[in-house]
Amino acid sequence: MLGKYSSAKNVPLVKGVRTEIDSGNQIEKPQPYTDTQSGSVIPSSVNFCSNTTYSFQISYPKDWFTTYNNKYQECTFFAPFSFVVPGYLEHDIVPISVVPVASADWQATVKLYENPNDYQNVLTTKNLEINGRSTEIIDTTSTGNGFVPLGLVKRSYLIFDGRMPLVIYYQQLNPNEDVTGAEKVLEEMISSLKYF
């Protein structure tokens, strides 16, 4: 009997059969040929949120919060503090927002984010592909003309999908916020985005 304290030399062997133990090799067989695993690791420090209206799933940090008033708002507001979504729809109430955009309105939405206006100064734009989707990253600062005070940063990801394009952004709401940490959370959320 093999156990925790026994040695392999005490195991009776069938004569004439050479074993991996006899040859001094590590036992590497049998290896299942159909056992496959996902290439992505899901950390225990995230929660998943699915919006069935717009058919997307996104992860967010376990110590962050999300809430909504109706099924259209599911998984569209995220913050490191608890909050209540007001009756009027204003996305700049929390640091990270997901804004579904109708395909017909996509070009107008891109122009709005790409161009300076009364509410934002555009600092940089960058085009790339994330998870197989054309994405534009736009960094801006606020002008102080709207709800957001002057000089606060915003990083927006404009993610094109033929069925349901999304704008996912981080808006700094307080000059003392950890912008770098929040942008890292945003980046991780973007990389977890899946459509279904």
Image (cartoon, rainbow, N blue to C red):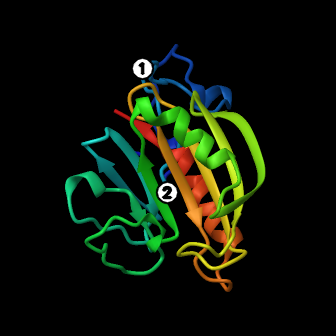
- State the residue in front, 151 or 29: 151
Crowd around label 2: few <14 · some 14–19 · many ≥20 (10 Å): few
Q: Quadrant of residue 105?
A: top left
Image quadrant holding the N terminus, namely top left
Percent x, y of residue 172: 61, 72
Q: Is residue 47 left or right of residue 92?
A: left
Q: Is residue 98 left or right of residue 119?
A: left
* Label 2 residue SS: loop
Crowd around label 1: few <14 · some 14–19 · many ≥20 (10 Å): few
Image quadrant holding the C terminus, namely top left
Query: How far separated are the C-alphas under marks 1 and 2?
Result: 24 Å
Amino acid type, residue under disc 2 in the picture: Pro
Residue in the image at 56% along x and 18% along y: 18
Percent x, y of residue 147: 53, 75
**Compared with residue 23, is residue 159 higher up or lower down, i.e. above or below?**
below
Q: Report the residue marked by disc 2.
A: 43
**Compared with residue 131, is residue 85 higher up or lower down, i.e. above or below?**
below
Q: Is residue 126 left or right of residue 59?
A: right
Residue in the image at 30% along x and 69% along y: 88
Q: Report the residue marked by disc 1.
A: 34
The answer to whether residue 53 of the structure is visible from this angle is yes
Residue in the image at 66% along x and 40% along y: 136
Residue in the image at 31% along x and 72% along y: 85
* Label 1 residue SS: loop
Percent x, y of residue 186: 58, 58
Q: Identify the mark at residue 184; answer none if there is no mark.
A: none
**Compared with residue 8, is residue 79 higher up or lower down, i.e. above or below?**
below
The answer to whether residue 44 of the structure is visible from this angle is no
**Compared with residue 129, is residue 157 higher up or lower down, i.e. above or below?**
below
- State the residue in front, 167 or 40: 167
